Image: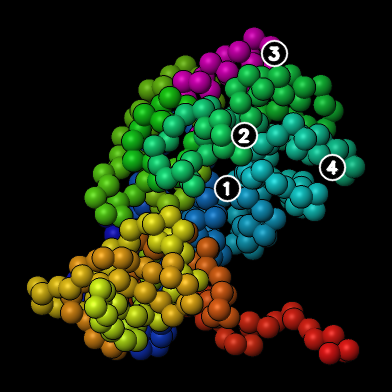
């Protein structure tokens, strides 16, 4: 569910008409619903209320510190994949003991930062990373708490670009290799084994890949126990999908039921890393129609948002429902919704039935809360959009729109030019 609905012929976010908001914010603009964010987090987290667990929101999905602060206030932690995301999490007040650090390419500086912040654990993705973290912990006089990310070779049945748990993916260590690495980690003086980690992919719409991965992890946990290695934390990652179009992903309660059934008898604290399922349908991208254009073969709606604002359609061929901010008649036209960037891949929708909009009309690109602003860029020297959080009938700017001066911040012209 979400709180973007038509009322009196206008699209509202909670109790605020979006047309009224745009009078002050302009476009393009990302808008998030506080009520939806809060509800989605609580529904996911409470599905596991009967077992020890920690819900660590995946910062890469939506990294604004106001959103992180909200989830932290609800008892959540975060899953990070960079030093910058750790910096954001700490600025948002997320306690170190609720932070897990994933990612295949942690640098020395990032490892040092995380060690000094005393995060809960590192999810280690390779033998060389294990050596690096042990070495940096030794240099700093610390002991790093670790889990190994296990690649279970499970087909997540999702887009290949967001599949992470198969042998051909760059993530994690295969099951047999992980068993050997755990034995080696046990001999290292500056790491403490506390967990095991797995993430099979993103936008999963079936439960079976999660269950299959869990079976393989359970076998490995029992094997490690025989070797004297006790696993306290089981990090099952994220990946639960949402409805963009016709998908019918399982409800978090169904997901929890399947996971808990597979975990019976395992005395582990669970860690989850949900991202999209929390924020995906809690945010929209608002854009203004600049022009309409007809050619012998196509009808185009040209808007002021572009692939630099929302790259998912260009990158993945992803579907985002698009609707006008004011309800219109039943007549539709097949159009491509495109932006101003000088790439043929700059589109938000292709061959889409859309009401007969005109220049000056406003559109909402739905389900844009996850991997929207976080993947935006300054391509074509376009300032990044603002971000707004709506609560009830009021709104708060949680990121100012960039201006042209922001585009050249940090750039310098050498004296010889």
Marks 4 and 3, the one that precedes in the sequence: 4
Q: Colour scheme used in the picture?
A: rainbow
For disc 2, the marked residue is 172
Residue 136, labelled with which disc? 4
274 relative to 94 in the view: left or right: left
Which class describes the residues within 10 Å of circle 3: few (<14), some (14-19), or many (20+)?
few
Q: Secondary structure at mark 2?
A: loop
Marks 4 and 1, the one that precedes in the sequence: 1
Q: Secondary structure at mark 1?
A: strand
At 43% from the left edge and 24% from the top edge, which residue is drawn? 212
For disc 3, the marked residue is 228
Is residue 226 visible from the viewing direction of this image? yes
At 41% from the left edge and 26% from the top edge, which residue is drawn? 211
Q: Quadrant of residue 244?
A: bottom left
Residue mark closest to the camera, 4 vs 2: 2
Q: Say whether marks 2 and 1 touch (CB < 8 Å).
A: no
Q: Residue furthest left?
A: 330
337 vs 185: above or below: below
237 relative to 82 in the view: left or right: left
Marks 2 and 3, the one that precedes in the sequence: 2
Looking at the picture, how far across and down is residue 274, in whole percent?
A: 46, 46
Looking at the picture, how far across and down is residue 251, in whole percent?
A: 30, 41
Asked if residue 326 lies in the magenta stretch, the reply is: no
Q: Quadrant of the N terminus?
A: bottom left
């Amino acid at each position: 569910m979400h709180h973007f609905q038509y009322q009196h012929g206008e699209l509202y976010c909670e109790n605020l008409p979006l047309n009224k908001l745009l009078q002050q914010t302009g476009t393009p603009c990302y808008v998030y619903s506080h009520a939806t964010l809060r509800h989605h987090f609580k529904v996911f987290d409470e599905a596991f209320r009967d077992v020890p667990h920690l819900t660590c929101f995946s910062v890469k999905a939506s990294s604004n510190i106001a959103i992180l602060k909200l989830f932290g206030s609800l008892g959540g932690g975060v899953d990070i994949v960079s030093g910058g995301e750790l910096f954001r999490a700490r600025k948002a007040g997320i306690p170190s003991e609720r932070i897990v650090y994933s990612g295949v390419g942690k640098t020395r500086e990032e490892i040092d930062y995380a060690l000094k912040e005393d995060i809960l654990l590192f999810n280690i993705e390779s033998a060389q990373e294990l050596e690096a973290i042990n070495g940096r912990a030794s240099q700093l006089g610390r002991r790093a708490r670790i889990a190994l990310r296990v690649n279970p070779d499970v087909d997540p049945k999702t887009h290949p670009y967001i599949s992470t748990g198969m042998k051909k993916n760059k993530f994690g260590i295969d099951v047999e290799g992980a068993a050997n690495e755990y034995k080696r980690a046990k001999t290292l003086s500056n790491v403490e084994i506390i967990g095991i980690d797995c993430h099979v992919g993103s936008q999963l719409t079936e439960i079976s890949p999660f269950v299959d991965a869990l079976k393989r992890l359970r076998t490995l946990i029992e094997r490690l126990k025989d070797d004297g290695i006790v696993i306290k934390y089981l990090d099952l990652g994220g990946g639960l999908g949402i409805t963009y179009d016709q998908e019918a992903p399982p409800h978090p309660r169904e997901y929890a039921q399947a996971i808990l059934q597979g975990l019976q008898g395992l005395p582990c604290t669970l860690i989850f890393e949900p991202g999209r399922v929390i924020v995906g349908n809690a945010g929209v991208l608002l854009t203004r129609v600049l022009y309409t254009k007809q050619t012998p073969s196509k009808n185009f709606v040209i808007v002021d948002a572009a692939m630099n604002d929302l790259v998912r359609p260009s990158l993945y061929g992803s579907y985002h429902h698009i609707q006008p901010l004011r309800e219109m008649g039943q007549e539709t036209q097949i159009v491509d919704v495109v932006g101003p960037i000088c790439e043929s891949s700059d589109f938000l929708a292709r061959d889409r039935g859309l009401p007969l909009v005109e220049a000056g009309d406003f559109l909402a690109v739905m389900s844009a809360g996850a991997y929207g602003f976080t993947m935006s860029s300054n391509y074509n020297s376009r300032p990044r959009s603002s971000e707004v959080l709506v609560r009830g009938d009021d709104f708060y700017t949680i990121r100012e729109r960039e201006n042209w001066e922001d585009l050249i911040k940090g750039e310098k012209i050498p004296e010889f030019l």
